Structure formats: C-alpha cells, structure tokens
Amino acid sequence: QVQLAESGGGLVQAGGSLRLSCEPSVSIFRLNDMAWYRQAPGKQRELVANITTTGVITNYIDSVKGRFNISRDNAKLYLQMNSLKPEDTAVYYCNGESRWYGKIFWGQGTQVTVSS
C-alpha cells in the first residue's frame, strides 16, 4: 500500500503563512491527480485544491483562491498557504489517486491552527 506523509502544519497568527508537504512512500510518478482536503471541527471534509499528474492544471475552492498555491515536484506535493485566516483552521489531508494501484490514498492529516 501507499502511505502519504503530511508535514508542515502548526500554529500561526492570522495573516501568516505555512507550507504543507506530502511525501508518498512510493514514487510520486505512481500517483496521478493529487489534492489537499481539510476538515474543520464539526464540519465535513472539503476539497481545498487539486492538481493534475503533470501539474499543469490546478483548481481551488473560492475561499482560498489567491492565497493558496498547490504544486508538485518529483518527490512531493505541496500547499503554500498565505494570508491565513482563522477560518482556515482545520486538519489538512493529502490525497492521491493511483491508476497504477487502482486506488485512492489518504494521509493521516496535519493540524493547521490560525489564531486571530
């Protein structure tokens, strides 16, 4: 199976920045479309941003457009988060679809807390 390991979460003041990373236990080239989700307390998990295999196409939810940037390189998936707001507080999860394995994989999540 594939493990996805997130890192980079933490506590930051409003207006600050964090960079999340997601490192798969296998070559990232065995993962196709990838994404970041988040789940705030008492709320459903929501898609924050996704990126295609080549990294050419990205999509964002409206609330993070212009503030967050999803990217990938030969090793990891990233989420650069700028101008953070208290409403961005959530557990952030890495997600990867693999046609090689025929499955979708999830990380364990990393906590992001934005104080006002």
Image (cartoon, rainbow, N blue to C red):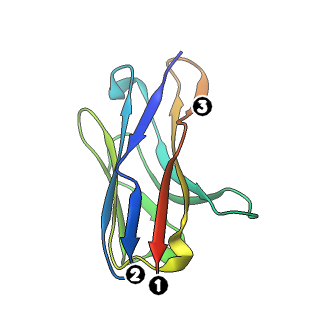
Residue 53 seen anywhere in this rendered image of the structure: yes
Task: Select label 3 or label 1 by which is in front.
Answer: 1
Q: Nearer the viewer, residue 72 or 55?
A: 72
For the N terminus, which image quadrant?
top right
Above or below, comparing residue 50 to residue 13 in the picture? above
Where 23 sits versus 116, above or below? above
Vertical comparison of 12 with 116: above or below: above
Residues at marks 2 and 3, CA–CA distance in whole angstroms? 33 Å
Q: Position of residue 86 (x, y in %)?
A: 51, 78
**Of helix, strand and loop, which one carries label 2?**
loop
Image spot of residue 92 (x, y percent): 52, 53
CA separation, marks 3 and 1? 35 Å
At x 33%, y 22%, the residue is 27
Q: Looking at the image, do the residues carrying marks 3 and 1 touch, with CB atoms under 8 Å apart?
A: no
SS category of the residue bearing label 3: strand
Tell me the kind of residue under disc 3. Ile
Question: Of the residues shown, which amino acid type is indicated by label 1?
Answer: Ser
Q: Is residue 93 left or right of residue 51?
A: right
Label 3 vs 1, first from the N-terminus: 3
For the residues marked 1 and 2, what is the alpha-carbon distance in whole angstroms? 5 Å
Instruction: Find residue 57 and report its image quarter.
Output: bottom left
Which residue is depicted at the point 46% across and 72% down?
114
Residue bearing the label numbered 2: 14
Please state which amino acid type lies under the numbered disc 2: Ala
Q: Residue furthest left?
A: 74
Q: Which residue is mark 1?
A: 116
* Lateral position of residue 25 relative to residue 108, left or right: left
Residue under pointer 3 = 104
Label pair 1/2, CB-CB below 8 angstroms: yes
Q: Quadrant of residue 54?
A: top left
The structure residue drawn at horizontal position 32% and vertical position 63%, both measured from the top left corner, is: 18
Q: Do the residues under discs 2 and 3 have CB atoms within 8 angstroms?
A: no
